[in-house]
């Protein structure tokens, strides 16, 4: 994604469309079929519920950042929601209901995570280069971080927390220019001590710790690759390296989640699907919506139920914004967007 200037809704819609690619003109035929596994590790997800429609003001809807709260509610952001429309939604997955948790007049929020330090919900605002936090009920908005890091303002996309509550941010700097200037930035749990841990990345997007919090999995949108960045210094361990090259065709690598067995769930922007890999780079499965489904073009992220295997995948396109479900390969943990 690229930074979205604060402009009129019409201009913003154009910028969002260019920044996020995709968005065709097909219509949706409801899926809703039961999950099945086919040859080659294919997992067919099933429709759970529709959360949003395309916004007239922006011409899009794009769901992202699913994360479970302590109360079991699933929080989801709508990146392209216009001013005053729901920008963070709270889904009751038991009752299959959705309500507005938060909105404002300016932000374009691309991810959401709960801090283990203060229990607040943190959001990345890619259009203003800020990280903000909310109380779990959606109130008490605070600016957690804004400003430059090493002379450049961030374009924060996704975030991950370590057990002490420090934030690790995928900074998509350079995306608008098509230059590999993306970074991984660590921010102290009180909003200070911002440090660049890695640079020279190609549109940094997904970011998630591995199971033991020893390293970060990082996806680069415009290179279709997943890198591994050790954060725990150990003898014999080198720096960042390319871990997986994702064969995605016209689709691109979006957000990442990790299950209790260490498997990676790599979302695909430009295809309503996810690629699942082992920590050694073996392609284990492809999760996709039913073949007859139209109007859904991107699967951006997933949240696996903490301690369970039911997974909720955010899928969007001209048909609207949906949750699709499937059975994950292992149980959900914090790195599976378990809150």
Image (cartoon, rainbow, N blue to C red):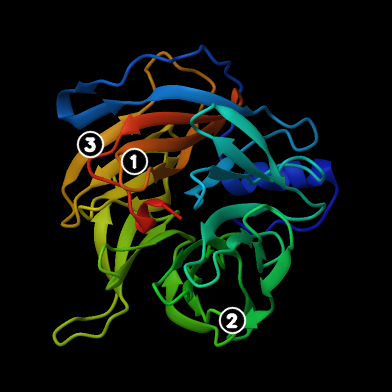
Residue shown at 35%/47% (left/top)? Answer: 266
Residue at the disc numbered 3? 285
Q: Position of residue 20 (x, y in %)?
A: 58, 45
State whether residue 33 is above or below residue 8: above
How many marks are shown on the rendered structure? 3
Asked if residue 163 lies left or right of residue 98, the reply is left
State whether residue 166 is above or below residue 170: below
Residue at the disc numbered 2? 190
Per the image, label 2 sits on a secondary structure element best described as: loop
| Label 3 close to label 2 by CB (< 8 Å) | no
Numbered disc in front, either 1 or 3: 3
Q: Position of residue 111 (x, y in %)?
A: 55, 54
Earlier along the polypeptide chain: callout 1 or callout 3? 1
State whether residue 170 is above or below residue 332: below
Q: Residues within 10 Å of mark 1 (few under 14, many from 20)?
A: some
Q: Residues within 10 Å of mark 2 (few under 14, many from 20)?
A: few
Q: Position of residue 313 (x, y in %)?
A: 43, 37
Q: Is residue 270 visible?
A: no
Asked if residue 339 lies left or right of residue 10, the reply is left
In this view of the protein, which residue sits in the foreground, 320 or 151?
Answer: 320
Earlier along the polypeptide chain: callout 1 or callout 2? 2
In this view of the protein, which residue sits in the foreground, 63 or 181?
Answer: 63
Residue at the disc numbered 1? 248
Numbered disc in front, either 3 or 2: 2
Task: Report, in whole angstroms, how far the alpha carbon at label 1 lies from the one at label 2.
Answer: 38 Å
Residue shown at 43%/15% (left/top)? Answer: 32
Asked if residue 260 lies left or right of residue 4, the reply is left
């Amino acid at each position: 994604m690229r930074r979205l200037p604060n402009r009129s809704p019409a201009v913003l819609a154009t910028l969002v469309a260019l920044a996020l690619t995709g968005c065709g003109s097909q219509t949706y035929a409801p899926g809703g079929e039961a999950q099945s596994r086919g040859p080659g590790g294919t997992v067919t997800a099933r429709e759970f519920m529709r959360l949003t429609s395309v916004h007239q003001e922006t011409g899009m809807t794009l769901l992202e950042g699913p994360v479970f709260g302590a109360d079991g509610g699933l929080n989801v952001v709508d990146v392209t929601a216009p001013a005053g429309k729901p920008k963070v939604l709270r889904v009751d997955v038991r009752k299959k209901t959705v309500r507005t948790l938060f909105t404002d007049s300016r932000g374009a929020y691309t991810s959401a995570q709960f801090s283990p330090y203060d229990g607040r919900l943190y959001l990345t605002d890619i259009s203003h280069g800020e990280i903000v936090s909310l109380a779990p009920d959606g109130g008490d908005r605070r600016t957690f971080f804004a400003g430059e890091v090493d002379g450049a303002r961030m374009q924060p996309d996704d975030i991950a927390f370590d057990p002490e509550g420090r934030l690790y941010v995928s900074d998509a700097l350079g995306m608008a220019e098509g230059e590999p200037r993306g970074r991984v930035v660590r921010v102290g749990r009180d909003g200070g001590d911002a440090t660049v841990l890695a640079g020279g990345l190609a549109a940094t997007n997904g970011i998630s710790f591995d199971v033991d919090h020893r390293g970060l999995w990082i996806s680069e949108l415009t290179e279709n690759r997943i890198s591994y960045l050790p954060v725990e210094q150990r003898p014999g361990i080198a720096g960042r390296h390319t871990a997986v090259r994702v064969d995605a065709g016209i689709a691109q690598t979006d957000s990442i989640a990790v299950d209790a067995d260490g498997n990676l769930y790599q979302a695909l922007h430009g295809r309503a699907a996810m690629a699942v890999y082992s920590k050694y780079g073996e392609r284990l499965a492809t999760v996709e919506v039913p073949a007859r489904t139209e109007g859904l073009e991107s699967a951006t992220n997933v949240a696996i139920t903490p301690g369970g295997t039911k997974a909720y995948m955010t899928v969007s396109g001209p048909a609207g914004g949906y949750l699709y479900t499937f059975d994950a390969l292992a149980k959900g943990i914090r790195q599976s967007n378990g809150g």
